[in-house]
């Protein structure tokens, strides 16, 4: 049986009031007094996270992950401890395989600490478990998207209860260690892939702790790379050090999510199975084995809580750099470029060292860096959208935005040629890549040469200008180490659907449609791509003008 416990940090609630006053005066016998605008927003920042632990002792499935059900980002870590004891036939007492450990005192259990180079090999006292139990870290299924789960019904952020399903037992509800007593707090039998897309659960009653509501199944984030030790993390290129994956400090056993967990997001699996070996099955007598899960969540401004001294172990030397990178969203801004909100002039930025996906603010506009195109040319895009613009009006609004840019920025902009007749690929003709989430990328763009060849590059026969990205640009810029590492990154900084310049369509539908990236409020996930957006719609639509600048 697996006892569970979670420590959850309380975060400060913030009330944000934004007030804008605009006063315009004039000359030439004209007066316009007290033209005023007020923009108010009252929002309560409500943190909330829940550790999920699904376990089935019959199938040996064991799923451990973290859900952020609040409306502010979180940082997460989890530590596993193991206990095992055995008793030979005819003996009265059990003998623990690690001296000094006691079954009903989980604080004595052995922290799972892996080798510096191999998560599947435990070291120190933890090495005693290598003979008897194999842990499977991460989640990977060939050709499959990330798994689905039922979101927690318990949204009381002062409650330390976990979402435990099947044979998993929450530590708050039951501290028994007899391998039989129930302590589940969440629907499911703990088997692999218990939930699927389209599932729902009515918690009226309530059946499980929490709100009496119906929840639809949601999807875990896709694992961008397998869990690794912090030494392996340190060897990654800097542009790959922040992302959706787990990093384990092998010196302390704490496993850290290598990204801020945004509101509504749920991590990939830290653990996918705990399987007993043949050596355990051949023990002449009986044995008890358990895993204890300790989860901790903090707001990103409290990384010192994770750096506090551990009474039994020493944090790895790279932990501070790791947590700072997660806090900042990038490790490379420490090289000398300004932070994302520092408003600077172009000559204060070194584009040549900028990592794809970096956010920066230049001459009053915030941008996302997309790629180094060579020859001193760099592709960037406005980080926020220009809201409520139809495709029909996009060229006028794009030009209007470009004309209003600071002259020092416009002086850097390179000429680009955009096809007068937009290349066409129907949404209904797309074949979608699997394993990265719904509508991540079409795999058959090369079957439409005009679409595939419409790539944003410097062309001296054109004019310096702003433009919308093409579908081919999105395909080229999406993936590990690129500007858009996952679906969520394509939706960051903007809540509305944003236009691409490639023409779309749906089968025999004669409505003129355009490719775009999905924002919030759509049946498809935020950041997904589709060629079904009606060009006449402006509500919920936005522009994200791009530029190629030369430095």
Image (spheres, rainbow, N blue to C red):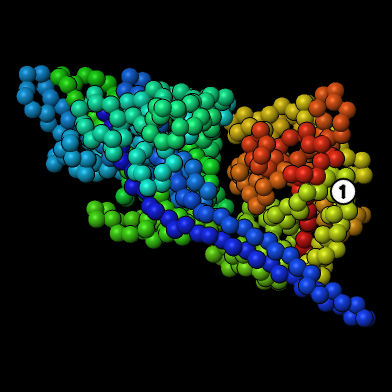
Picture quadrant where residue 166 is located: top left
Q: Position of residue 219 (x, y in %)?
A: 54, 33
Residue drawn 16% across the image and 27% down it: 86
Q: Secondary structure at mark 1?
A: helix
Residue 118: image x %, image y %? 38, 40
In the displayed structure, would residue 521 be above or below residue 408? Answer: above
Residue appearing at x 75%, y 61% in the figure: 376
Q: Residue at x 25, y 34 (%)?
A: 174
Q: From what the image shows, is residue 238 above or below residue 540?
A: below
**Of the pair 321 and 531, the residue shown nearer to us:** 531
- The answer to which quarter of the image holds residue 287 is top left
Q: How many marks?
A: 1
Viewed as shown, does residue 265 lie left or right of 524? Answer: left
Q: Residue at x 31, y 50 (%)?
A: 252
Residue 207, image x and y in percent?
Answer: 40, 27
- Give the labeled residue for mark 1: 393
Tell which of 414 and 502 is nearer to you.
Answer: 502
Q: Residues within 10 Å of mark 1 (few under 14, many from 20)?
A: some
Q: Residue 451 location in percent, x, y?
A: 82, 37
> Quadrant location of residue 97?
top left
Above or below: residue 79 compared with residue 129:
below
Q: Is residue 114 visible?
A: no
- The answer to whether residue 102 is above or below residue 325 is above
Q: Nearer the viewer, residue 534 or 438?
A: 534
Q: Is 495 positioned to the left or the right of 203 in the image?
A: right
- Pick the quarter of the image with the N terminus: top left
């Amino acid at each position: 049986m697996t006892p569970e416990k979670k420590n959850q940090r309380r975060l400060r609630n913030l009330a944000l009031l934004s007030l804008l006053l605009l006063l315009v005066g004039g000359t030439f016998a004209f007066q316009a007094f007290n033209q005023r605008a007020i923009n108010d927003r009252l929002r309560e920042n409500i943190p909330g996270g829940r550790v999920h632990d699904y376990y089935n002792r019959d199938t040996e499935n064991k799923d451990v992950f973290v859900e952020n059900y609040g409306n502010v980002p979180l940082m997460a870590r989890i530590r596993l401890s193991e206990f095992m004891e055995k008793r030979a036939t005819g003996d009265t007492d059990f003998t623990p395989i690690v001296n000094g450990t006691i079954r009903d005192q989980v604080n004595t259990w052995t922290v799972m600490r892996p080798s510096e180079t191999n998560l599947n090999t435990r070291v120190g006292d933890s090495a005693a478990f290598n003979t008897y139990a194999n842990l499977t870290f991460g989640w990977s299924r060939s050709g499959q998207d990330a798994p689905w789960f039922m979101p927690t019904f318990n949204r009381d952020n002062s409650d330390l209860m976990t979402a435990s399903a099947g044979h998993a037992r929450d530590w708050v509800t039951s501290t028994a260690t007899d391998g039989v007593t129930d302590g589940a707090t969440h629907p499911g039998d703990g088997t692999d892939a218990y939930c699927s897309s389209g599932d729902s659960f009515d918690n009226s009653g309530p059946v499980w702790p929490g709100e009496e509501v119906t929840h639809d199944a949601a999807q875990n984030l896709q694992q961008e790379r397998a869990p690794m030790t912090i030494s392996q993390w340190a060897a990654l290129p800097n542009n790959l050090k922040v992302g959706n994956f787990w990093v384990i400090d092998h010196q302390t056993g704490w496993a850290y999510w290598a990204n801020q967990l945004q509101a509504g997001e749920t991590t990939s699996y830290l653990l996918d199975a705990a399987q007993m070996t043949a050596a355990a099955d051949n023990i002449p007598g009986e044995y008890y084995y358990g895993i204890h899960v300790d989860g901790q969540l903090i707001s990103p401004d409290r990384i010192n809580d994770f750096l506090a001294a551990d009474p039994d172990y020493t944090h790895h030397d790279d932990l501070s750099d790791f947590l700072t990178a997660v806090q900042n969203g990038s490790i490379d801004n420490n090289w000398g470029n300004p932070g994302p909100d520092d408003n600077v002039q172009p000559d204060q930025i070194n584009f040549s060292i900028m990592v794809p996906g970096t956010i920066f603010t230049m001459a009053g506009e915030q941008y996302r860096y997309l790629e180094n195109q060579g020859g001193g040319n760099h592709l960037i895009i406005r980080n926020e959208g220009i809201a409520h613009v139809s495709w029909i009006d996009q060229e006028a609004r794009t030009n209007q935005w470009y004309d209003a840019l600071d002259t020092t920025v416009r002086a850097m902009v390179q000429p680009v040629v955009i096809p007068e007749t937009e290349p066409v690929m129907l949404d209904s003709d797309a074949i979608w890549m699997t394993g990265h989430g719904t509508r991540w990328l079409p795999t058959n763009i090369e079957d439409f040469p005009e679409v595939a060849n419409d790539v944003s590059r410097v062309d001296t026969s054109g004019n310096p200008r702003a433009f919308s990205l093409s579908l081919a640009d999105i395909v080229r810029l999406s993936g590990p180490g690129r500007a858009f590492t996952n679906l969520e990154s394509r939706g960051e900084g903007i809540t509305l659907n944003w236009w691409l310049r490639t023409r779309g369509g749906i089968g025999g539908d004669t409505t003129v449609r355009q490719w775009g990236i999905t924002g919030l409020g759509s049946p498809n996930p935020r950041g997904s791509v589709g060629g079904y957006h009606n060009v006449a719609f402006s509500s919920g639509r936005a522009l994200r003008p791009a530029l190629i600048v030369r430095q």
